[in-house]
Image (cartoon, rainbow, N blue to C red):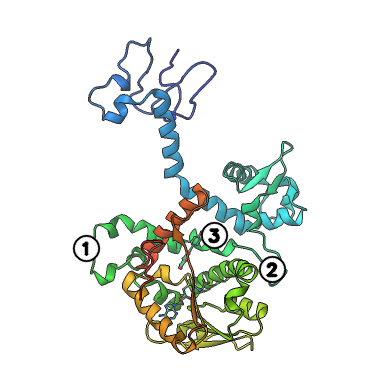
Amino acid sequence: MKVSEGQMPWPMGVYKYLALDLIIARPARSHCLSSSSGQKSMAQNHSAPPMMATASSAELLQAQAELWCHAMAYLKSMALQSVIKLGIPTAIHRCGGAASLSELRAHLPVPASKLPCLSRLMKLLVTSGVFGESEAGAYSLTPVSRLLVEDDAEGSRTCLSPFAILASSPFHHRSSQRLPEWLEKEEGDAAAETPFMMAHGAGFYGYVGRDSEFGALFNEAMAADSRVTAQVVVRECGEVFAGSASLVDVGGGDGTMAKAIARAFPHVRCTVLELPQLAGNMPADGMVEFVAGDMMEFIPPADVVLLKFVLHNWGGDDCVRILNRAKEAISTREPKGKVVIIDTVAGLASSKQTFEAQGLMDICMMLLTTGEVRDEEKWPCKV
Ligand SMILES: C[S@@+](CC[C@H](N)C(=O)[O-])C[C@H]1O[C@@H](n2cnc3c(N)ncnc32)[C@H](O)[C@@H]1O
Ligand SMILES: O=c1cc(-c2ccc(O)cc2)oc2c(O)c(O)ccc12
């Protein structure tokens, strides 16, 4: 195996295999690693840590490539944010489901000079499975990017773009930048309860109420998720609401889920319990009633108490408190009263991606709130 020294300005792995030559280039103090070079290879370097001592060159290069992927993973998220903001998934949809960049151009606010750069972003997102690409260079939607299409059919929308924009927003990035410093702090420092609080000087829902730009972003993201989840709930969970006359959606946001339930099951009278900052600004539409209050203190009585994406915001003691209020709310409705929880159960994953998604959501909760994504063991079911 012939090995060239210092030819490439990039770290190992970029030009991993070039014809039959393995070219290993280092930016500084280039080492020529070759069985014939006579130099000491890393595998022979006895001062190196054990992993380095045993890893073959191919394993090192593979590990290096993987490290690049992890360290630069946020760029995938930013590429995703860019194409959503440019409206590319919707443009592909409007072009009939597949289109080249030049065909898409008429629909995009991108000057011709930037098309080559956009094509590089698209290439990354094709590699990541967000878009498909034909041999002729036409981009198509995949199941992932279909979730990013803004279509206009009210009620059947499955657009999760606001959720992706929220997760990649500067509000979240600034919080994640505080994570290492936050981990060094002892518990009990009220000003540093969460990385979000360290970055923004307020708790998550305090900030949602204080910053109207962030509040709108957050509420729209939650509503987008609820539109998708509501379709599944309406399709799959009809029997849950069959014998019920009333429901209270606790922390029900802008009422998207409650309205979907009221529409699909008109015999259920739906109420949304929300913080005054949100409930106080919701126009009465006759579909659902908004009640301003604190779920830690009181939940209005109903046959069904719904908690969607609420308990993962809270630590165990707070969850037990909320669940006790929920139990009181259904106590006069026995035996038909029920508490319905829609949330993530870690570990119940049908794929590696689902498992990883659960882990990412758990870290998201650590950044923003005192909550977590719980496994079956941890769910605070006994109240
Ligand atoms: C993660 S969001 C979930 C929203 C909605 N359930 C959904 O899944 O789209 C949590 C909601 O709980 C509300 N909330 C937070 N603290 C609350 C409290 N003490 N009492 C009532 N609602 C609260 C927030 O305003 C927010 O809308
Ligand atoms: O602020 C958030 C963000 C998310 C979120 C957005 C996008 C993703 O791909 C994953 C997670 O979820 C949240 C959430 O569930 C919550 O209860 C509060 C805040 C957020």
Mark 3 Cβ inside 8 Å of ligand 2: yes
Q: Left or right: 138 with respect to 15? A: right
Between 148 and 338, the residue placed more toward the observer is 338
Mark earlier in primary sequence (2, 3): 2
Name the amino acid type tagged 3.
Ala
Between 109 and 174, the residue placed more toward the observer is 174
Between 31 and 233, the residue placed more toward the observer is 233
Residue topped by disc 3: 164
Hey, which residue is sitting farthest right in the picture?
96
* Quadrant where the N terminus is found in the figure: top left
**Residues packed near mark 3 inside 10 Å, few (<14), some (14 to 19) or many (20 plus):** some
Between 38 and 223, the residue placed more toward the observer is 223
Please provide percent x and percent y for residue 284. 60, 89
* Quadrant where the C terminus is found in the figure: bottom left
Residue topped by disc 1: 186
Residue topped by disc 2: 156
Name the amino acid type tagged 1.
Glu
The label nearer to you, 1 versus 2, is 2
Q: Left or right: 64 with respect to 17? A: left
The label nearer to you, 2 versus 3, is 2
Q: Secondary structure at mark 2?
A: loop
Please provide percent x and percent y for residue 278. 50, 82
Q: Secondary structure at mark 3?
A: helix
Name above or below for residue 283 compared with residue 370. Answer: below
User: Which residue appears at 68% of the width and 72% of the height?
Assistant: 155
Name the amino acid type tagged 2.
Ser
Q: CA distance from mark 3 to mark 1?
A: 32 Å
Name above or below for residue 65 compared with residue 233. Answer: above
